[in-house]
Amino acid sequence: MKPNIVFIFADDWGWGDLSCHGHPFLKTPNLDRLAREGTDFQQFNVLSPVCSPSRTAVMTGHYPARYSVHQHFAEPAQNHQRGMPDWLDPNAPTLPRFLKEAGYRTAHFGKWHLTSRLTEGAPKPEAYGYDEFAVFNGGAEWESADLHATAANTAAFIKASKGKPFFINAWIHESHTPHVPTLESMEKWKHLDPQKQVYAAVITDGDNAVGMILDALKAEGLEDNTIVMFSSDNGPEHTAAKDAQLKSDPDAQVKGYDTYYSIGQTGGMRGRKRSLFEGGVRVPFIVRWPGRTTAGAKNDTTAFSAVDLLPTLCAAAGVTLPADYKGDGENLLAAFNGKAVPRTRPIFWQWLGTKSEPDYWPRLAVRDGDWKLVMTDDAQRVELHHLTHDRAEANDVSKDHPEIVARLTKLALDWKATLPTGVDPSCVSKTRGNEPKKRGKKREAPKPTATTPTKDRNLHFTRWDTNKDGFLSLDEYNAGQKGGENLEARFKKFDKNGDWKLTSEEFVGSGAK
């Protein structure tokens, strides 16, 4: 009998944000139950430290850079600035399509973000192999679900399965901003200070969603024949400086709380979201498959990665992959069955986003065996870490092992040379509106500084705030500046409260209207 498959994918949920991983005050009873009844894979990596490329790897079994997906999908003009398409290629091989062709009912509920809600003309999830969907962060014309609907939609789909095998991506919102915790969860944690209260409530909401899905499987008698997996798309968001306006805003419960309340933990690993160090890319991965995965086990041996999910799950479902499918992962089904499987292929990462000290400077990384090398694009700066002995990546041993550095550097650069340098034109929105003009050279607007007149900076703020959320992110600032010098340092001068989001008041000045 083919197993059902449910993949619960959280957002910005740190490795340390589970009580079974030792968090000092968060409680995750449903995830703890999943770990007791399944196997906790403690060396699982996603293939990007941010959302869209991480999810691309899960969907395709390919490194996201093979589709020029380097950062999160934003509005088309910003994607263009980054050398990205406007959506994942619907012709790419995908896990739901392979399973659907093998007789599975397929569904995607929750976050999508394989395009942007600001993009028109993006393919719907059905183009990637889904029978049903209800998503947020989808295309401009078809985004439909709210942030808390994922578990309810998943439960309804399970109930309607009627004995046919199913595959469900249940991609929950927690713990991404805006933090919109339920009143019930806020009440549960009212004894904590406001910062801890909000984050604990958000984690509780996410854990409750997991519990609702587990309960739905139990109610339908499907527990024993269902693979349930829980993971996160990247490490925890950075914790911003205190935002007095939001703290005093009575509507924050509805509009959401910002990154001041993002106090997720990495479990002692270096880096966070947007970093190629382990804190940005090593995330929880718990698998329950009764009778197959060992209950209560911790696998700290197998280096599992997101590109391995497609071949592993297809093997679990008895699906033979097409002969022309050349994936980047490997079939690690034996690890699901309780074996300490050694990985045979290296793992690669590329990062083209935020670049700052001390943990965000690496552009490339490679892991082979227990060794991990992080490096700049030109390999002039490297760090080497032995992950078994140094999980926290605190000790750079590159000078002690020049031969390993040379070997891994060559692996990373050779891999980089295989990546595309352009974008598939079929994955570009017709409404980009910023393609280069053939007639004449457009005069560049002056770069705003702290002394630029308020009126001009106000225009820049409005134009560069591409997602119209009332803030400028570092990515939006960089895109607006079109590759200027010392952009991050200039951004920080405006960013008075250190939350990595510029308000109009910070960027434009107190005279802004």
Image (cartoon, rainbow, N blue to C red):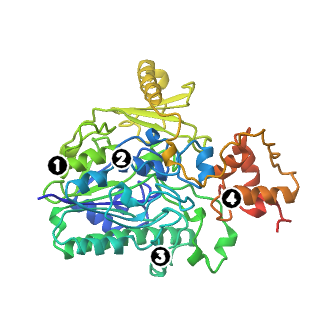
Q: Residue at x 16, y 62 (%)?
A: 225
User: On the picture, is 466 further left or further right than 450?
Assistant: left
- N-terminal-most mark, 4 or 2: 2
Check contact, mark 1 vs mark 3: CB within 8 A: no
In front: 112, or 200? Answer: 112
- N-terminal-most mark, 2 or 3: 2
Label 4 amino acid? Answer: Asp
Q: Label 4's element? A: loop
Note whether residue 323 is visible.
Answer: yes
Total numbered labels: 4
User: On the picture, is 3 further left or further right than 42?
Assistant: left
152 shown above or below 410: below
Label 3 amino acid? Answer: Trp
Which residue position holds label 1? Answer: 337
In front: 114, or 505? Answer: 114
Which residue position holds label 4? Answer: 465
The answer to which image quadrant residue 324 occupies is top left
Of tags 1 and 4, the one toward the viewer is 4
Please give the label number shown on residue 43. Answer: none
Query: Could you give the CA–CA distance between mark 1 and mark 3, rounded to whole angstroms?
Result: 38 Å
Please give the label number shown on residue 60. Answer: 2
Query: Could you give the CA–CA distance between mark 1 and mark 2, rounded to whole angstroms?
Result: 23 Å
Label 2 amino acid? Answer: Thr
Please state, as top left, top right, bottom left or bottom right, where the C terminus lies in the image.
Answer: bottom right
The answer to which image quadrant residue 347 occupies is top left
Give residue 175's position: percent from left, percent from top: 47, 63
Which residue position holds label 3? Answer: 189
Query: Could you give the CA–CA distance between mark 1 and mark 4, rounded to whole angstroms?
Result: 49 Å
Query: Could you give the CA–CA distance between mark 2 and mark 3, rounded to whole angstroms?
Result: 39 Å
Label 1 amino acid? Answer: Asn
